[in-house]
Image (tube, rainbow, N blue to C red):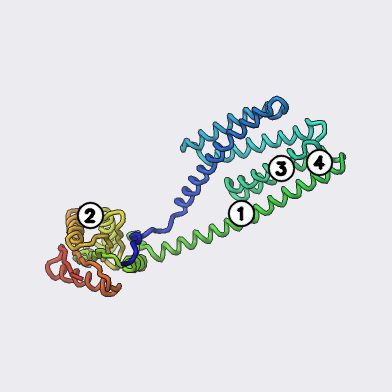
Amino acid sequence: MPSETPIPSYAPPESPLEITQRWERRRRHFYLIASLASLPSILAVWLQHRADNPFIAVTYPFLILAGIFWSAALLWKRVSLVWIERFVLVAVSLLFLSKLLYLWFGVPDPARSWDEVEAVYWVIAILFIIGYIALERRAALGFSTALLLVTTLLGAWRFWPGPANLGVEFIRLEVRLAAISFLLFVLARTKDDFSRTLAAANQMHQMAHTDSLTHLPNRRGITQLLEAYLARRKRFALILADIDRFKLINDTFGHETGDTILREVGACLQRQIRTGDTIGRWGGEEFLILAAEEDAQSALQLAQRLQEMVAAAEFSAGIPVTASFGVTLSCEQDTLVSLIKRADLALYRAKNNGRNRVEWEAP
């Protein structure tokens, strides 16, 4: 017996807005976890070094309060993530620039605290990375360039002239920071190019598999899904629906009204099927529905409900609209052609037997 596989479903490509919202949710979660995780360590450092380090004693309480504020802002969805990111970038940048000033100008011998200076530079590098995550590429480049310029000017003021060994170490740190900034810019540009290519590919895929009029899967999209259903080798229902006398609607009221009727009938049918079922536009005024029903009675009941809902619905311009339905179940020997042929035969009988009805074709 074949293994059980999930029921295939039609998933249209994400729109740019949906991708942006998903990316924003992930960033918000990441920032929240990082903020909450960092608070205990900041508190521990403050408790341990507040007596022997004036900078930590003064600034870390503000950093702890800021971390609490950022966490609350991240939890409150009404606060714009863009403003949170910019505020954090500016605040943390000012904090560590002030620490750099303290280490270079407030400590009698900067060489003895050079490990802390290097740690500050690594934090600045991390700020560069966060800048490219939070900001548009050009804005992130401006942010990183500004930080690099400030550290360069401060270091030049402190170490020129000055101890030769510290001057060399300072230049090494600046070159490393400049290289990181350049590499991040190149990677961000590559990422933006890839994002544009991916968006274009998604758009092309959506155009190729979605009907532009009804926004349902088109014949190509629903055919791929139907092949996936058949590959599962598990019984399902196929319902073929056709709007009755649609040519008369077009001839009497015009093609624009006909297009509106198509959209409204598609939407009406879609509202009546379950989440796991799929409806697509098969062509012209025909719709094809794939449903997880495994017995004839359930499939016929579903089709009957769809037929009654279309007949009872109010459509544009008060035009009475009905539809005919052909129903069948799949079997293990079915191919795409054989399955569609049975549903088409049932639909043909529904048309010949007076329309606005449901007919069944056994496997």
Residue 310's quadrant in the figure?
bottom left
Residue 232, position in %: x, y?
33, 66
Label 2 crowd bin: few (<14), some (14–19), many (20+), radius 10 Å: some
Amino acid under disc 3: Tyr
Q: Nearer the viewer, mark 3 or mark 2?
A: 3
Seen from the viewer's position, the closer of residues 42 and 268 is 42
Q: Name the N-terminal-most of marks 3 and 2.
A: 3
Residue 74, position in %: x, y?
51, 37
Residue 319, position in %: x, y?
20, 57
Residue 304's quadrant in the figure?
bottom left
Q: Distance between the residues labelled 2 and 4?
A: 76 Å
Label 1 crowd bin: few (<14), some (14–19), many (20+), radius 10 Å: many
Q: Distance between the residues labelled 3 and 1?
A: 21 Å
User: Which numbered disc covers residue 121?
Assistant: 3
Residue 208, position in %: x, y?
41, 66
Residue at the left extreme, as displayed: 353
What residue sits right under mark 4 in the picture? 156
Mark 4 secondary-structure assignment? helix
> Where is 75 relative to 268, above or below?
above
Amino acid under disc 4: Ala
